[in-house]
Image (cartoon, helix red, strand yellow):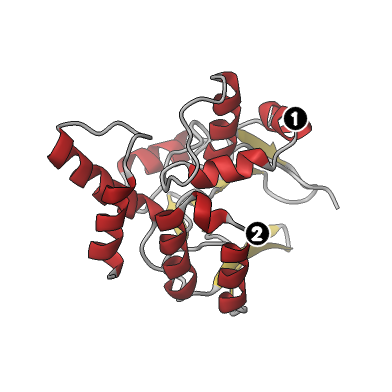
Amino acid sequence: YTCYFVKGNKEDYWINYQMNGEMGWKDKDSTTGSLLYTYTHLREKDISFFKELPIMKEVCIEGMPPITICHGSPRKVNKKMKPNDEETLHILEQNSTDIILCGHTHIQCKIEHNGRKIFNPGAVGVPLHSGGQSQFMILNGIDGEWKEEWISLCYDVEQTIEDLYQSGLSEMAPYWCRVTENLLRTGEVSHGSVLAEAMKYCKEETGECIWPNIPEQYWKRAVEVILGK
């Protein structure tokens, strides 16, 4: 089958880490441990592939309206396109196609504006507000129009969590994995929200907090406050 690939924020992280001399990420660190874990399992040809990826692509299938695919937005890999957001609506109005298929937020949603649409299929791995189910979307071409089909599936969450800990990732990113475990079970509380809380505690005690230098003690406090001990 023909497949289309675009670059997301994680690909940018790994590319930049390599270009900056592989400095700044640490083992046994909840801020960067998971990024480092993945990076150590990438090959040079993987990084080369990431570098060639566009941040957006227009997909044209005969007999169907064209679709813009991107991770964040057609302009920026880490842009969160949200409902009732003026910048999101402006991006949609200025886009070359009437349909944008995006991701990044891990939240299933459909945004409509002046006959144009944004679809976010959620996430297969760690979707938010999913009730612990895996989520994706199928676009069906029917009579020259795209019809969306939203999918939420139950799966063996506990086996996935066991695999997570057996992989060794929990040792490289302890509290990040604790957040992941909760997210897999409930579909609630993002890594970003816990990170923001940890950075707040870090700044309160030290006077500043610059990513990725967030000591584990602040991750621990944030996890205990948000998720419980």
Front residue (pair 24, 74): 24
In the depicted structure, whether residue 63 falls above or below residue 183: above
Instruction: State the image coordinates of residue 175 (x, y, percent, origin top left).
Output: 40, 56
**As drawn, is 119 to the left or to the right of 140?**
left
Looking at this view, is 170 or 7 the one in front? Answer: 170
* Point 78% across, 31% down: residue: 45
Q: How many neighbours does mark 1 have within 10 angstroms: few (below 14), some (14-19), or many (20 or more)?
A: few
Number of the label disc, if any, that sits on residue 44: 1
- Residue type (three-letter) at the residue carrying disc 2: Trp
Label 2: which secondary element: strand
Q: Nearer the viewer, mark 2 or mark 1?
A: 1
* Residue topped by disc 2: 146
Disc 2 packing (10 Å; few <14; some 14–19; many ≥20): some
Cα distance between the residues tagged 2 and 1: 38 Å
Q: Is residue 92 visible?
A: yes
Q: Amino acid at mark 1?
A: Glu
